[in-house]
């Protein structure tokens, strides 16, 4: 499949022509120049090769939720700096820079309906410090899960993450345990949990809620793994095989239930929830 | 083997050895000198080990002569029966597990196990488990649950193994599933960090009612080297990363992640395995006894509340 690995060949002269980036996007899968509006209508999936371009949290909400049904909660939770962490920049400066782009944190959560089914939906945002999981992401997921538990409705998480928020140290690590604890209670209550894995989902998110769905769905070509490809290559001192840690590889190895095209995602989740869960009325 | 900050300690020890050797060969009485030096050595050890920097703590936590899981198992427990395999793929020797007795009760032990020499390390993969290690651990924890016995988990790993087979067989899923299942295990479960607890690989056997840490152990989301390589763009800045990560037992106790610090003999657990094991035995027995008094409902409610409270954020 064409979008597995970017060609390492140098760009040809004609590829270097300036693309007016406000109107056009270049497909990373096939190199086709695509009219942005047309691409958005196609949910940012390349009409030529099927490559799934990365989209933000709000885009997933409009794709998955019935129009106008989504009500966000916990939008006011913002990152703190519990360890007083400072690397090349201090952590509050990094938070402020990320927030300046108009985003509060790496995750949006709320309630809404999907094909008429009441659900709680949480969507990670890779654009906020690499979709890293810190206390706010963990707390928002825990709170969202508790809402699902209280309302006895299905829970869904769309993941996109580079892993732990290192600047929160052990707090970041412990969010894996915190979110998994809430998912255990949802499991015990007999409520569905659907995990949707998008490009990329790695590190602590893969080793906690992203892999805990009754059904794990993944977008085509999404990189999904615990260790990042570079870390593995450095460890084993060899190049990774084609398609390693991609969604299709994970389906083949039994870790995701289905690779689902973004354009079919909502209908697929609706069908699964209807099969699983009789607690809603139509 | 000694660590770089132990140079003065080693020097005094060498002086003592020389004197004793001299006394042996020439028949002179050196007991006064040796007594003075020994007391000086004890003072110096105490002072050095009370004032370790975070990176020095990391070195002690990784000391090649530090007692590992099976060294404690042999000293803290009796009637040890090791059980092997995940029933699915193979036996991962980076995690050991089995039945043992502690203070008159049977307990299930799970622990990451490093090798003492190169040969053993190849077998145990330097204490870096594959998915089947985590699945073996869960199988044994669920066996303990079936028979109503407590679980004690020893954490000591540089991390889960980042390799081809590990990813192919779902290391992420294996850890995730353990986190979820440990949080609903209906028996008391206690973890103790005895060396280095690195990342999700440590947490994969670490969702427990109580988290104990040996005095010179460390627990972190990432190794100082790994953190420095990413955030400072060079592993050379590992000391800065070690400081920033707040990974020592003392730091983690101060923020309530570590429930109890288990003191080590002066000079570290590697100086006196038996003494280290004695202190740990008392702490484990007492902790399990406390948890055994709780009903299952109370036990689980406390465990959930413990993890759901972890985090720091602003509301605005
Ligand atoms: Zn394309």
Image (tube, grey):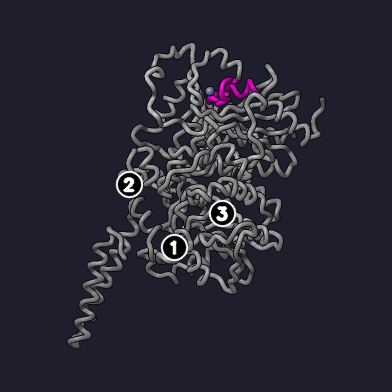
* Residue that appears at 35% across and 32% down: A89
Residue B150 location (% of width, % of height): 63, 61
Residue B268 location (% of width, % of height): 38, 63
Q: Nearer the viewer, residue B41 or B181?
A: B181
Q: Give the residues drawn in magenta, as a range.
A: A43-63
Residue A232 location (% of width, % of height): 45, 46
Q: Earlier in the sequence, mark 1 or mark 3?
A: 1
Q: Was residue A24 drawn as part of the magenta stretch in this picture? A: no
Look at discs 1 and 2 and give the one toward the viewer. Answer: 1
Q: Is residue A128 above or below residue A241?
A: above
Find residue A92 and report its image quarter.
top left
**Residue topped by disc 3:** B205
Residue A206 location (% of width, % of height): 56, 41
Look at discs 1 and 3 and give the one toward the viewer. Answer: 1
**Residue topped by disc 1:** B121
Q: Which mark is drawn over residue B163?
A: none
Quadrant (top left, top right, bottom left, bottom right) of the C terminus of chain A: top right
Dot 1: few (<14), some (14–19), or many (≥20) neighbours within 10 Å? some
**Residue topped by disc 2:** B239
Q: Mark yes or no: residue B282 visible.
A: yes
Q: Indicate yes or no: mark 1 CB to ligand 1 under 8 Å.
A: no
User: Mark 2 falls within which chain?
Assistant: B
For the residues labelled 3 and 2, the Cα–Cα distance comes to 27 Å
Q: Secondary structure at mark 2?
A: helix
Q: Was residue A58 drawn as part of the magenta stretch in this picture? A: yes
Q: Nearer the viewer, residue A223 or B176?
A: A223
């Amino acid at each position: 499949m064409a979008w597995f690995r970017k060609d390492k060949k140098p760009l040809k002269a004609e590829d270097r022509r300036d693309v007016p980036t406000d109107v056009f996007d270049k497909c990373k899968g096939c190199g086709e120049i695509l009219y942005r509006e047309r691409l958005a209508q196609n949910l940012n999936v390349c009409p030529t090769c099927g490559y799934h371009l990365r989209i933000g949290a709000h885009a997933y909400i409009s794709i998955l939720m019935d129009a106008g049904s989504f009500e966000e909660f916990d939008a006011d939770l913002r990152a703190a700096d519990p360890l007083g962490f400072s690397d090349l920049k201090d952590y509050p400066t990094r938070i402020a820079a990320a927030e300046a782009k108009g985003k509060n944190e790496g995750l949006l959560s709320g309630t809404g309906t999907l094909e008429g089914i009441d659900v709680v939906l949480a969507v990670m945002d890779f654009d906020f410090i690499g979709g890293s999981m810190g206390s706010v992401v963990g707390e928002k997921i825990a709170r969202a899960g508790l809402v699902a538990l209280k309302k006895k409705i299905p829970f869904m998480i769309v993941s996109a993450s580079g892993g732990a928020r290192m600047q929160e140290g052990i707090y970041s690590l412990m969010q894996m345990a915190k979110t998994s604890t809430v998912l255990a209670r949802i499991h015990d209550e007999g409520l569905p949990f659907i995990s949707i894995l998008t490009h990329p989902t790695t590190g602590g998110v893969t080793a906690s809620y992203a892999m805990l769905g009754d059904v794990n769905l993944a977008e085509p070509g999404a990189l999904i793994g615990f260790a990042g490809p570079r870390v593995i290559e450095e460890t084993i001192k060899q190049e990774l095989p084609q398609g390693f840690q991609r969604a299709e590889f994970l389906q083949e190895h039994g870790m995701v239930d289905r690779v689902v095209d973004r354009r079919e995602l909502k209908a697929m989740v609706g069908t699964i929830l209807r099969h699983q869960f009789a607690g809603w009325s139509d | 083997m000694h660590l770089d900050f132990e140079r003065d300690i080693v020097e005094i020890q060498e002086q003592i050895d020389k004197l004793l050797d001299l006394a042996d060969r020439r028949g002179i009485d050196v007991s006064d000198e040796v007594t003075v030096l020994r007391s000086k050595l004890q003072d110096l050890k105490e002072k050095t080990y009370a004032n370790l920097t975070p990176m020095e703590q990391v070195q002690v936590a990784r000391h090649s002569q530090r007692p590992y899981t099976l060294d404690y198992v042999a000293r803290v427990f009796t009637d040890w029966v090791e059980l092997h395999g995940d029933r699915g793929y193979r036996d991962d020797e980076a995690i050991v597990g089995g039945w043992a007795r502690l203070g008159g009760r049977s307990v299930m032990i799970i622990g990451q196990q490093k090798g003492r020499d190169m040969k053993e390390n190849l077998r145990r993969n330097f204490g870096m488990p594959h998915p089947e290690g985590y699945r073996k651990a869960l199988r044994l924890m669920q066996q303990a649950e079936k028979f109503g016995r407590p679980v004690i988990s020893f954490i000591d790993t540089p991390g889960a193994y980042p390799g081809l087979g590990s990813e192919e067989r779902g290391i992420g899923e294996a850890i995730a599933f353990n986190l979820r299942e440990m949080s609903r295990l209906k028996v008391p479960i206690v973890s103790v960090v005895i060396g280095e607890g690195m990342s999700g690989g440590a947490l994969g056997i670490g969702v427990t009612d109580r988290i104990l840490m040996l005095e010179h152990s460390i627990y972190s989301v990432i190794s100082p080297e790994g953190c420095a390589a990413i955030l400072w763009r060079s592993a050379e800045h590992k000391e800065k990363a070690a400081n920033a990560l707040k990974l020592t037992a003392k730091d983690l106790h101060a923020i309530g992640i570590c429930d109890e610090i288990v003191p080590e003999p002066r000079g570290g657990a590697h100086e006196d395995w038996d003494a280290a094991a004695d202190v740990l035995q008392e702490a484990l027995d007492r902790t399990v006894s406390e948890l055994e008094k709780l009903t299952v409902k109370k036990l689980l409610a406390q465990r959930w509340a413990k993890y759901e409270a972890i985090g720091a954020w602003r509301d605005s």
